Image (cartoon, helix red, strand yellow):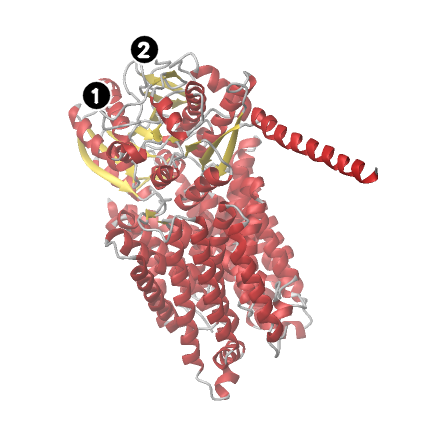
Amino acid sequence: MQAIQILIDGFAISSLYAIGAIGFTLMFGVSGVLNLSHGAIMVVSAVAAWAVAGALPVGPFGGALAGVVTGVVFAYATYLLVVRPIQTSRTIPGEEKEIFVLTGTLIWGIMLAEAVAYFFTNNPKTVLPLISGVVMIFGERTPSNKIMTAVIAWAVIGLLWLLVNRTKAGKTLMAAAINPRALTLLGYELSHIYLLVWGIYGVLVGLAGVLLGAFLGVSSDNVGTLTASAFSIVVLGGLGSVSGSLIAAYVVGYLETFTAYLIAPSIRTVPVLLLLVAVVYIRPQGLMGRR
Amino acid sequence: MRTSRLYPLLALILLCLALLPFGVGGYILGLLTVGYYYGVIAMAWDLLFGFAGEVNFGPSFLVGVGAYTAALLNHYQHWPIWACLIAGSLAAMVGGMVLAVPALKLKGPYFGLITLVAVLLLQNMLVLFSGVTGGEIGLDVPDVLTISDNGNYWYALGFMTISGAILFGLSRSPTGLILQASGQDAIEASALGFNVAKHKMVAFAVSAIFSGLAGAMLIFYLATVSVGTVVDLTIGAQVIIAAVMGGRRTILGAALGSVLLIIGNELLRPIGQLATFFVSATALVMILFFPGGFLGRLLRPEGRE
Amino acid sequence: MKEISHSKRRATLLASVLAGALALPLAAQAADPIKIGVIAETSAISGVAIPNGAKLAAEEINKAGGINGRMIEIVEYDDHNSAADAVRAFQRAGNQDKVVAVIASYVSEVVLALQPWSARMKLPMITPGAASDVITQRVHDDYANQKYVFHGYLASTQIADAVCEAGKDILVTQMKVKTAVVMSEDAAWTVPLDEEYLKCLSGIGIKVVDHIRLSPDTTDFTPIFNKVEGLKPDVIVTGISHVGVQPTVQWQQQQVPMAMFGVSSQASSSTFWKDTNGAAEGVVFNMVSAPDVASTPKTIPFAQAYEKKYGITPGYAGYTAYDDVYMYADAIKRAGSTEPDKLVAAMEKTDWVGTIGRIQFLGQDSKFTHGMKIGPGFVSGLMVQWQGGKTVTVWPADAATGKLRFPANIKLGN
């Protein structure tokens, strides 16, 4: 029945969006960086997972692991090669650092996309699903892979919640998001905190890329849209708010799914873009934004 | 650099450029032609960013609106070129005003987002109605400015020169200084009694008109318009790279950056697909280590950095 | 005297320089390569086959002595699947690099954008992979200007007819299909394709219950497949080229119970199996030539040489690009010149056995002017299916190297 299909599909795609969006907003919230190479790192991770699974007999789990590790590696590369040099630069005036980080990560993202296209062509690659086969849910045949995606997404969200609320490191992260200066006064090393957040970001982005690769397939052509999509969700939910991004991801996911099923698949992104425009004009801080 | 030295130098450079067709082949002229049009777009971007402090991540929105308006009118209604150009610029100006409204209310990254969303929306609309617009691959434009390589080159050079003169003049005028002040410290500027909002609107309008006009002229040179040529996010990236590499807040630097980018891409052509990669890598290195750009030192107006 | 010997020396120097200057162009001309431009999207699977196939042909011809002693030089251009880039590349090829002929693209929109330039610059051009009927229609309607354009592939209408012809045997007889959904990407080449599908499918007794055109940007095909399933057709007749990997993977993951039959350009290369992680199993697609079928004595040796050199089987446009270089070389030889009008006249008289069949170009009396002659003995189609990591030709019967085989979840016929 179509309603069940919409429910399931919407849930799966929203969970996928959520992981990427949470990573993006966490990065902004804690370190103030809007990483425009977000989509590129996702694609690189997915392609790595595909390549490793194809070249070595490690099966889908080995490939997925390789993908996540790649995500972490490239996240750190982004930080160390692009973001930190700009943040610590003496020649760039303070108030322009944000713009330079945006431009720098944009260029870095383009470089990564071109490199992927060069080595692997722009043909979409699909990552081996962790679980193949289908299950029946209320009479609707659903790929097990989709259920897996949602399960993993929520497991990761749960782990993140635990990290942030129950561990010292996590609490420090959140404190840094709210008031970095106070934190330094208390003797914490911001640079350590930044390293931690980029690591967590790397895991989230790598995972998002791998799951996307298994769910839909990715190609270097998708880099721009993936970044734009994450950016949009995060602004909708409120820049810097993790719970906001989570809710916004589901709003966007379901809005797209409704549009695809009930109107036409070709315009699925349009209502979301219009919603975004409306939000930015009317309530620019997003659903749960603080500033 | 003092203006007394600058203007004669510029005149000399322009003279040399104007004489190029007598010594150089059609293909290089073609490259420079495109470079000059992008130069105008980059200069318009610099006016908005460098002077009004607004980061426009989607200059291709304005370019696309101008280009497609002109292309559609020419393709379907067979309007003459000059009419299409005017229509394109006006449409782009309207687009610029639409962007200006939230800009005046929003801070920092939010405005950048609107500009990105604008490009995405335009792209989606164009692809959606690809039956009319030709979608991703494009629509052919029946009229061209001229078939001659030299002619096209001189049109582009002339356009860039005039636009550059206007934009540069604007940047050095009292309006320009106010814009600069509004861009760097809006609070202080309004405290000094300037109508920041009005000046920013002017900046948007001007930036939009020139971007749209450049886009429209470009398609009458290429004889085709497509999402990939005038609307894609990578166009925006190229424009930003050109302006930043050339030197923010110098206007002329943006034009220089554009030409250098085109030449750079061409020189790297032998390595095929990796050309974009290396150009981007160079741009990245430049913004990390030489954020003032090529002309930053030379042309930065007096005052604080 | 000093002055005289000085001027004598100058004279000798001048004479030798003049002699050298005269000799140089003569020497240069003897070694002057014949340049052929190849414009394609090299970062796409279907696109890279074009320069690859062309280069292979050039190498072989050069090894055998070139064209009357002159070597062929392939000049490559990446068009990034953009009409504007392709136009610039074309202008460069003709004006700067002075190529004598161009082999361009597999994307109809790009070829259509290049056609006016081929006419303006009087530069002969052939497409090894684009399908739109409009290409040859323009040549037919404006022969004097457009005669420089040749269509080295089947027109969409002809492809649809080939698919229906195969459908008579495979779909109707073997699979007992009564209803179908036509699913194509929204692009220039599928407009005539779908039109013909709708006509010829009902002609073989299959009812088309729906006609879906999807955006080439689609990444999530779930809603589309769900819709198709809801209509309960016996088969999905496809017209896809820009998309291929993603719909195929999602088709398999969802275990859509209908087979996919028709045109799927990306499926023609061996990387397709890897890219889809084997989801391609059971996909039946049209090709003009396949690596396991000797359409002509040249087909299999070409496919093997290609695989040896590039590590993968040729994408569909690789065969035609290879043939195109040979045909240009043959035409230049017969014309004794690379001058455009003479080259075009010689091309029109082409009677060449390539890898895809025996190639002759149709004349002004046909509506597909400068298209290829289709039919038994000339160029005809094959239907190929992915089975266990290999492509197996399943139609026509006299060329088939295997039988139809579908994954377990496909329900066949009623």
Q: Nearer the viewer, residue A185 or B263?
A: B263
Give the residue type at disc 1: Val
Reply above or below: A152 against B43: above
Q: Is residue C166 above or below residue B304?
A: above
Q: Which residue is mark 2?
A: C398
Camera-nearest residue between C327 and A83: C327
Residues at circles 1 and 2 in contact by the CB criterion of under 8 Å: no
State which quadrant residue C280 falls in.
top left
- Left or right placement of residue C312 versus residue A259 in this view: right
Asked whether the residues under marks 1 and 2 belong to the same chain, the reply is: yes
Circle 2 marks a residue in which chain? C
Horizontal and vertical percent position of residue A101: 57, 62
Q: Position of residue B258 (x, y in %)?
A: 53, 57
Q: Is residue A101 visible?
A: no
User: Does residue A208 appear left or right of residue A260 in this picture?
Assistant: right
Mark 1 and mark 2: span between their CA atoms?
18 Å
